[in-house]
Protein backbone atom coordinates (compact mmCIF):
# COMPACT_ATOMS: atom_id res chain seq x y z
CA UNK A 1 0.00 0.00 0.00
CA UNK A 2 1.43 3.40 -1.01
CA UNK A 3 2.39 5.90 1.67
CA UNK A 4 -0.17 8.70 2.14
CA UNK A 5 1.57 12.10 2.01
CA UNK A 6 0.70 15.81 2.34
CA UNK A 7 2.86 17.47 -0.34
CA UNK A 8 0.03 18.54 -2.66
CA UNK A 9 -1.86 20.10 0.24
CA UNK A 10 1.19 21.92 1.61
CA UNK A 11 2.83 23.14 -1.61
CA UNK A 12 -0.14 24.27 -3.67
CA UNK A 13 1.77 27.10 -5.39
CA UNK A 14 4.73 24.95 -6.45
CA UNK A 15 5.28 23.03 -9.68
CA UNK A 16 5.62 19.29 -9.16
CA UNK A 17 8.19 18.15 -11.72
CA UNK A 18 8.08 14.44 -10.89
CA UNK A 19 6.92 12.06 -8.17
CA UNK A 20 7.01 8.40 -7.15
CA UNK A 21 4.80 6.83 -4.49
CA UNK A 22 4.92 3.13 -5.32
CA UNK A 23 6.60 2.06 -2.13
CA UNK A 24 4.96 1.69 1.34
CA UNK A 25 7.94 3.13 3.21
CA UNK A 26 8.99 6.07 1.04
CA UNK A 27 7.42 8.63 -1.29
CA UNK A 28 9.44 11.12 -3.37
CA UNK A 29 8.61 14.44 -5.04
CA UNK A 30 10.69 16.84 -7.12
CA UNK A 31 9.27 20.38 -6.87
CA UNK A 32 10.08 23.88 -8.11
CA UNK A 33 9.11 26.89 -5.98
CA UNK A 34 8.67 30.58 -6.52
CA UNK A 35 9.23 33.01 -3.64
CA UNK A 36 6.38 33.33 -1.19
CA UNK A 37 4.46 31.66 1.63
CA UNK A 38 3.44 28.01 1.65
CA UNK A 39 0.51 26.31 3.39
CA UNK A 40 1.18 24.72 6.77
CA UNK A 41 -1.01 21.64 7.27
CA UNK A 42 -0.07 19.25 10.05
CA UNK A 43 2.17 16.68 8.33
CA UNK A 44 0.83 13.15 8.31
CA UNK A 45 4.29 11.66 7.80
CA UNK A 46 7.87 12.76 8.40
CA UNK A 47 9.22 14.97 5.61
CA UNK A 48 12.82 15.58 4.55
CA UNK A 49 13.37 18.50 2.17
CA UNK A 50 16.65 18.80 0.26
CA UNK A 51 17.56 21.94 -1.70
CA UNK A 52 18.85 21.06 -5.18
CA UNK A 53 19.22 24.52 -6.72
CA UNK A 54 18.40 28.15 -6.06
CA UNK A 55 18.45 29.44 -2.51
CA UNK A 56 17.56 32.27 -0.19
CA UNK A 57 16.11 32.84 3.24
CA UNK A 58 13.82 30.14 4.62
CA UNK A 59 11.65 31.40 7.48
CA UNK A 60 9.50 28.88 9.29
CA UNK A 61 7.81 28.39 12.64
CA UNK A 62 6.76 25.12 14.19
CA UNK A 63 5.96 23.76 17.64
CA UNK A 64 6.51 27.25 19.07
CA UNK A 65 10.02 27.58 17.55
CA UNK A 66 10.94 30.21 14.96
CA UNK A 67 13.72 29.24 12.54
CA UNK A 68 15.49 31.38 9.93
CA UNK A 69 18.31 30.15 7.72
CA UNK A 70 19.97 31.03 4.44
CA UNK A 71 19.37 27.98 2.28
CA UNK A 72 21.83 26.92 -0.39
CA UNK A 73 22.12 23.78 -2.54
CA UNK A 74 22.92 20.70 -0.47
CA UNK A 75 21.07 21.86 2.63
CA UNK A 76 18.27 19.84 4.20
CA UNK A 77 15.22 20.49 6.40
CA UNK A 78 13.27 18.06 8.59
CA UNK A 79 9.56 18.28 9.42
CA UNK A 80 8.51 15.46 11.79
CA UNK A 81 5.05 13.93 11.62
CA UNK A 82 2.55 15.96 13.64
CA UNK A 83 4.57 19.20 13.65
CA UNK A 84 2.33 22.22 14.35
CA UNK A 85 3.78 24.59 11.75
CA UNK A 86 2.32 28.09 11.61
CA UNK A 87 4.54 29.78 9.01
CA UNK A 88 6.71 28.81 6.04
CA UNK A 89 8.09 31.40 3.64
CA UNK A 90 10.76 31.32 0.91
CA UNK A 91 12.52 34.51 -0.15
CA UNK A 92 13.47 33.29 -3.63
CA UNK A 93 13.14 30.55 -6.21
CA UNK A 94 14.16 27.06 -5.12
CA UNK A 95 14.16 23.54 -6.51
CA UNK A 96 13.78 20.80 -3.90
CA UNK A 97 13.61 17.05 -3.46
CA UNK A 98 11.00 15.97 -0.90
CA UNK A 99 11.17 12.59 0.83
CA UNK A 100 8.20 11.39 2.88
CA UNK A 101 8.75 8.71 5.50
CA UNK A 102 6.08 6.77 7.42
CA UNK A 103 5.16 7.89 10.95
CA UNK A 104 6.99 4.83 12.27
CA UNK A 105 10.41 5.61 10.84
CA UNK A 106 11.48 1.98 10.67
CA UNK A 107 9.41 -1.00 9.67
CA UNK A 108 9.16 -4.07 11.89
CA UNK A 109 12.04 -5.95 10.27
CA UNK A 110 14.34 -2.97 10.70
CA UNK A 111 13.19 -2.55 14.30
CA UNK A 112 14.32 -6.09 14.95
CA UNK A 113 17.73 -5.29 13.48
CA UNK A 114 18.17 -1.98 15.34
CA UNK A 115 16.44 -3.10 18.58
CA UNK A 116 14.66 0.28 18.85
CA UNK A 117 11.29 1.01 20.43
CA UNK A 118 9.37 3.08 17.83
CA UNK A 119 7.34 4.75 20.58
CA UNK A 120 10.52 6.44 21.81
CA UNK A 121 11.66 7.76 18.42
CA UNK A 122 11.13 11.49 17.92
CA UNK A 123 12.78 13.23 14.97
CA UNK A 124 13.84 16.86 15.50
CA UNK A 125 12.34 19.86 13.72
CA UNK A 126 15.75 20.67 12.27
CA UNK A 127 16.69 23.31 9.70
CA UNK A 128 19.62 24.41 7.56
CA UNK A 129 21.40 21.05 7.76
CA UNK A 130 24.67 21.18 5.81
CA UNK A 131 24.99 17.39 6.08
CA UNK A 132 26.80 15.98 3.07
CA UNK A 133 26.25 12.38 4.20
CA UNK A 134 22.50 12.96 4.29
CA UNK A 135 22.60 14.65 0.88
CA UNK A 136 24.62 11.85 -0.73
CA UNK A 137 22.30 9.19 0.68
CA UNK A 138 19.21 10.79 -0.82
CA UNK A 139 20.26 12.73 -3.93
CA UNK A 140 20.35 9.61 -6.22
CA UNK A 141 16.57 9.45 -5.82
CA UNK A 142 16.19 12.50 -8.07
CA UNK A 143 17.63 10.55 -11.01
CA UNK A 144 15.27 7.68 -10.25
CA UNK A 145 12.31 10.00 -10.84
CA UNK A 146 13.51 11.06 -14.28
CA UNK A 147 14.44 7.74 -15.89
CA UNK A 148 12.49 4.63 -16.92
CA UNK A 149 11.73 2.18 -14.12
CA UNK A 150 14.04 -0.78 -13.64
CA UNK A 151 13.36 -4.16 -12.00
CA UNK A 152 15.88 -3.41 -9.24
CA UNK A 153 14.37 -0.05 -8.23
CA UNK A 154 12.44 -1.47 -5.27
CA UNK A 155 15.62 -2.97 -3.84
CA UNK A 156 17.51 0.27 -4.52
CA UNK A 157 14.88 2.35 -2.70
CA UNK A 158 14.73 -0.07 0.21
CA UNK A 159 18.50 0.23 0.70
CA UNK A 160 18.31 4.03 0.71
CA UNK A 161 15.41 3.94 3.16
CA UNK A 162 17.36 1.82 5.64
CA UNK A 163 20.49 3.99 5.30
CA UNK A 164 18.41 7.16 5.68
CA UNK A 165 16.59 5.86 8.76
CA UNK A 166 19.86 4.84 10.40
CA UNK A 167 21.40 8.26 9.71
CA UNK A 168 18.38 10.14 11.03
CA UNK A 169 18.25 8.02 14.17
CA UNK A 170 21.96 8.47 14.75
CA UNK A 171 21.98 12.23 14.31
CA UNK A 172 18.56 13.91 14.28
CA UNK A 173 16.42 12.59 17.10
CA UNK A 174 15.39 15.26 19.59
CA UNK A 175 17.91 14.07 22.16
CA UNK A 176 20.81 14.10 19.67
CA UNK A 177 20.33 17.21 17.52
CA UNK A 178 20.70 20.72 18.82
CA UNK A 179 20.36 23.91 16.80
CA UNK A 180 23.82 25.34 16.06
CA UNK A 181 24.88 28.34 18.08
CA UNK A 182 24.72 31.50 16.03
CA UNK A 183 27.35 34.17 16.23
CA UNK A 184 25.95 37.14 18.14
CA UNK A 185 27.78 39.41 15.67
CA UNK A 186 25.75 38.30 12.63
CA UNK A 187 22.34 37.22 13.82
CA UNK A 188 19.50 36.55 11.34
CA UNK A 189 18.24 40.14 11.59
CA UNK A 190 21.60 41.64 10.58
CA UNK A 191 22.15 39.01 7.92
CA UNK A 192 18.75 39.76 6.42
CA UNK A 193 19.56 43.46 6.39
CA UNK A 194 22.72 42.75 4.40
CA UNK A 195 20.85 40.48 1.97
CA UNK A 196 18.14 43.08 1.45
CA UNK A 197 20.80 45.70 0.73
CA UNK A 198 22.40 43.41 -1.87
CA UNK A 199 19.05 42.79 -3.59
CA UNK A 200 18.33 46.51 -3.74
CA UNK A 201 21.81 47.33 -5.08
CA UNK A 202 22.46 44.66 -7.74
CA UNK A 203 22.69 47.28 -10.46
CA UNK A 204 25.28 49.41 -8.68
CA UNK A 205 28.73 49.15 -7.19
CA UNK A 206 28.45 46.96 -4.07
CA UNK A 207 31.51 47.47 -1.87
CA UNK A 208 32.58 45.24 0.99
CA UNK A 209 32.71 48.28 3.28
CA UNK A 210 29.06 49.05 2.55
CA UNK A 211 27.98 45.49 3.32
CA UNK A 212 29.96 45.46 6.55
CA UNK A 213 28.34 48.75 7.56
CA UNK A 214 24.90 47.17 7.16
CA UNK A 215 25.94 44.56 9.71
CA UNK A 216 27.73 47.10 11.95
CA UNK A 217 30.98 45.18 11.65
CA UNK A 218 34.48 45.76 10.33
CA UNK A 219 35.05 44.45 6.77
CA UNK A 220 37.41 41.75 8.09
CA UNK A 221 35.00 40.36 10.68
CA UNK A 222 32.05 40.73 8.34
CA UNK A 223 33.70 38.67 5.58
CA UNK A 224 34.46 35.83 7.99
CA UNK A 225 31.02 35.80 9.60
CA UNK A 226 29.20 36.14 6.28
CA UNK A 227 31.05 33.11 4.92
CA UNK A 228 30.17 31.14 8.07
CA UNK A 229 26.50 32.10 7.72
CA UNK A 230 26.10 31.53 3.99
CA UNK A 231 28.97 29.27 2.93
CA UNK A 232 30.02 31.90 0.37
CA UNK A 233 32.29 34.94 0.36
CA UNK A 234 30.46 38.28 -0.01
CA UNK A 235 31.85 38.69 -3.55
CA UNK A 236 30.73 35.20 -4.60
CA UNK A 237 27.28 35.69 -3.10
CA UNK A 238 26.79 39.00 -4.93
CA UNK A 239 27.96 37.47 -8.21
CA UNK A 240 25.59 34.50 -7.80
CA UNK A 241 22.66 36.80 -7.11
CA UNK A 242 23.46 38.90 -10.19
CA UNK A 243 23.62 35.79 -12.35
CA UNK A 244 20.30 34.52 -10.96
CA UNK A 245 18.64 37.88 -11.58
CA UNK A 246 20.05 37.95 -15.11
CA UNK A 247 18.72 34.44 -15.78
CA UNK A 248 15.26 35.55 -14.78
CA UNK A 249 15.43 38.59 -17.06
CA UNK A 250 16.82 36.57 -19.96
CA UNK A 251 13.89 34.18 -19.70
CA UNK A 252 11.47 37.12 -19.93
CA UNK A 253 13.09 38.14 -23.26
CA UNK A 254 12.32 41.80 -22.66
CA UNK A 255 15.69 43.58 -22.45
CA UNK A 256 18.73 43.39 -24.70
CA UNK A 257 21.91 41.73 -23.44
CA UNK A 258 23.67 45.05 -22.92
CA UNK A 259 20.67 46.38 -20.98
CA UNK A 260 20.69 43.34 -18.71
CA UNK A 261 24.45 43.70 -18.20
CA UNK A 262 24.00 47.27 -17.00
CA UNK A 263 20.80 46.57 -15.07
CA UNK A 264 22.46 43.99 -12.84
CA UNK A 265 25.87 45.49 -12.26
CA UNK A 266 28.08 43.58 -14.72
CA UNK A 267 29.46 46.82 -16.13
CA UNK A 268 29.67 45.70 -19.75
CA UNK A 269 28.22 43.08 -22.04
CA UNK A 270 31.60 41.40 -22.42
CA UNK A 271 31.99 41.03 -18.65
CA UNK A 272 28.38 39.84 -18.39
CA UNK A 273 29.06 37.13 -20.98
CA UNK A 274 32.28 36.03 -19.24
CA UNK A 275 30.74 35.79 -15.76
CA UNK A 276 27.48 34.22 -16.94
CA UNK A 277 29.24 31.62 -19.07
CA UNK A 278 31.45 30.61 -16.15
CA UNK A 279 28.40 30.15 -13.90
CA UNK A 280 25.94 28.58 -16.36
CA UNK A 281 28.22 26.93 -18.97
CA UNK A 282 26.25 28.89 -21.58
CA UNK A 283 26.51 32.40 -22.94
CA UNK A 284 23.57 34.72 -22.15
CA UNK A 285 22.40 34.48 -25.76
CA UNK A 286 22.40 30.68 -25.65
CA UNK A 287 20.55 30.67 -22.35
CA UNK A 288 17.89 32.98 -23.78
CA UNK A 289 17.47 30.71 -26.80
CA UNK A 290 16.89 27.71 -24.51
CA UNK A 291 14.40 29.56 -22.31
CA UNK A 292 12.45 31.09 -25.15
CA UNK A 293 12.40 27.97 -27.33
CA UNK A 294 13.88 29.76 -30.34
CA UNK A 295 16.39 27.03 -31.21
CA UNK A 296 18.47 24.27 -29.75
CA UNK A 297 22.00 25.24 -28.77
CA UNK A 298 24.52 23.30 -30.79
CA UNK A 299 28.11 22.76 -29.80
CA UNK A 300 29.47 23.89 -33.14
CA UNK A 301 27.85 27.34 -32.62
CA UNK A 302 29.61 28.05 -29.32
CA UNK A 303 32.36 30.21 -30.73
CA UNK A 304 30.04 32.12 -33.02
CA UNK A 305 27.55 32.82 -30.21
CA UNK A 306 30.31 33.93 -27.88
CA UNK A 307 31.61 36.44 -30.43
CA UNK A 308 28.09 37.70 -31.06
CA UNK A 309 27.41 38.26 -27.34
CA UNK A 310 30.68 40.11 -26.87
CA UNK A 311 30.24 42.29 -29.92
Image (cartoon, helix red, strand yellow):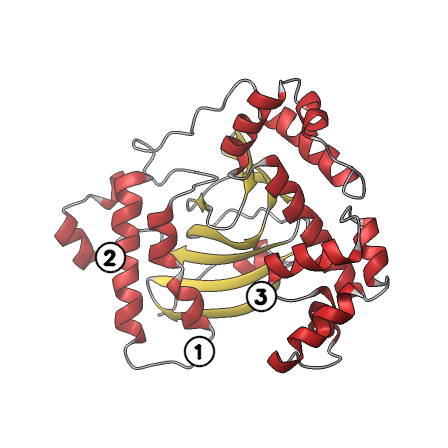
- Labels 1, 3: front one: 1
> Which residue is the site of mark 3?
16
Give the residue at x 81% y 62%: 257
Residue 172 in picture, x, y percent from top left = 33, 39
Residue 243 in picture, x, y percent from top left = 68, 53
Residues under labels 2 and 3: Cα distance?
Answer: 28 Å
Give the quadrant of the C terminus. Answer: bottom right
Q: Is residue 311 left or right of residue 72?
A: right
Give the residue at x 59% y 24%: 222
- The relative height of residue 120 versus residue 16 in the rendered view (above or below) is above
Residues under labels 1 and 2: Cα distance?
Answer: 27 Å
Q: Is residue 37 left or right of residue 161?
A: right
Mark 1 or mark 3, earlier in chain:
3
Q: Is residue 278 visible?
A: yes
Instruction: Find numbered disc 3 in the image and state the secondary structure of the residue it sits on.
Output: strand
Residues under labels 1 and 3: Cα distance?
Answer: 16 Å
> Which residue is the site of mark 2?
107
Give the residue at x 66% y 78%: 297
Mark 2 or mark 3, earlier in chain:
3
Mark 3 crowdedness (10 Å alpha carbons): few <14, some 14-19, many ≥20: some
Give the residue at x 64% y 67%: 282
- The relative height of residue 190 versus residue 35 in the rendered view (above or below) is above
Give the quadrant of the N terminus. Answer: bottom left
> Which residue is the site of mark 1?
147
Amino acid sequence: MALVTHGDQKYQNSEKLAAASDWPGLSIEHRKFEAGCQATPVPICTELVMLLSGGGMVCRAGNGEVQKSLARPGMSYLVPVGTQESHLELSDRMECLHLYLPPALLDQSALADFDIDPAKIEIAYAHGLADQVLFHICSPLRDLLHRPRQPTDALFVEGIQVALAAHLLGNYTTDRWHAPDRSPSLDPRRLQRVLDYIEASLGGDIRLEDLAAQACLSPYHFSRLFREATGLSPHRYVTDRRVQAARHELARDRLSLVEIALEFGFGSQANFTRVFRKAASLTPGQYRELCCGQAEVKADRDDMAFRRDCA
